[in-house]
Amino acid sequence: MQHSERSGSRGDDGALVLRSLLAITRRGLVDARSGDTQLSFTDQSIVMAIAEEPGIRSTDIAKMFRLNRSTVSRQLSSLIGLGLVQELPGASGRGRPLTLTTEGEAAFRTTLHTLQHAIDTHLSEWTDAEVARFARDLHRFDRGSAES
């Protein structure tokens, strides 16, 4: 009997984690889209991937986010058209390395600043120990999903 109570509670807790992550993501997207550059969730994800790994290729991005290559190609065309991303010349093989333009780096920094402000506001009443624990647990949770 005790085992089933734990299972129900664990299931309820898991559902709460899912609802909370979805709500946080939704609010973060709305906050990040309030700046000068209106980027979709996919656009923001691609810009972040390029910012964190300059020289990444479209095929790597597709694999990273489990997206179809044609989807990434369309998104990149849009981001290149907006002047946020550029292909690096002279590379051979499938796909050219990508980098952010000066405008792309500014949009990325603005998005990060907006999101960081939202996080800081939500955590403002937490103790340092609570924030540290949450950061460790969230990092552990994220690492676990990357291995699947």
Image (tube, rainbow, N blue to C red):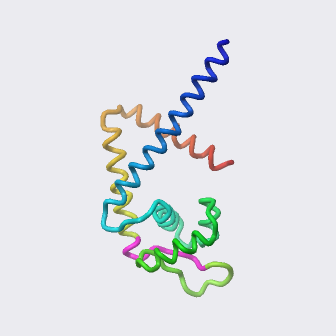
Question: Residue drawn at (43%, 45%), measured in percent from left and top?
Answer: 24
Q: Quadrant of the N terminus?
A: top right
Question: Residue drawn at (35%, 33%), measured in percent from left and top?
Answer: 126
Question: In the orientation shown, which residue stands out farthest toward the bottom?
Answer: 90
Q: Position of residue 72 (x, y in %)?
A: 57, 70
Q: For residue 48: magenta? A: no
Location of residue 112 by image quarter? bottom left
Q: Position of residue 60 (x, y in %)?
A: 63, 67
Q: For residue 97: magenta? A: yes
Q: Out of 84 and 75, give the one closest to the viewer.
A: 75
Location of residue 7 by image quarter? top right
First to last magenta residue range: 96-104
Q: Out of 15 and 102, give the one closest to the viewer.
A: 15
Image position of 87 with respect to 65: above or below: below
Q: Position of residue 2 (x, y in %)?
A: 65, 13
Question: Residue drawn at (61%, 63%), measured in percent from left and top?
Answer: 67
Image position of 118 with respect to 47: above or below: above
How many numbered marks does the figure carry?
0
Question: Residue drawn at (55%, 28%), measured in percent from left and top?
Answer: 12
Q: Position of residue 17 (x, y in %)?
A: 51, 36
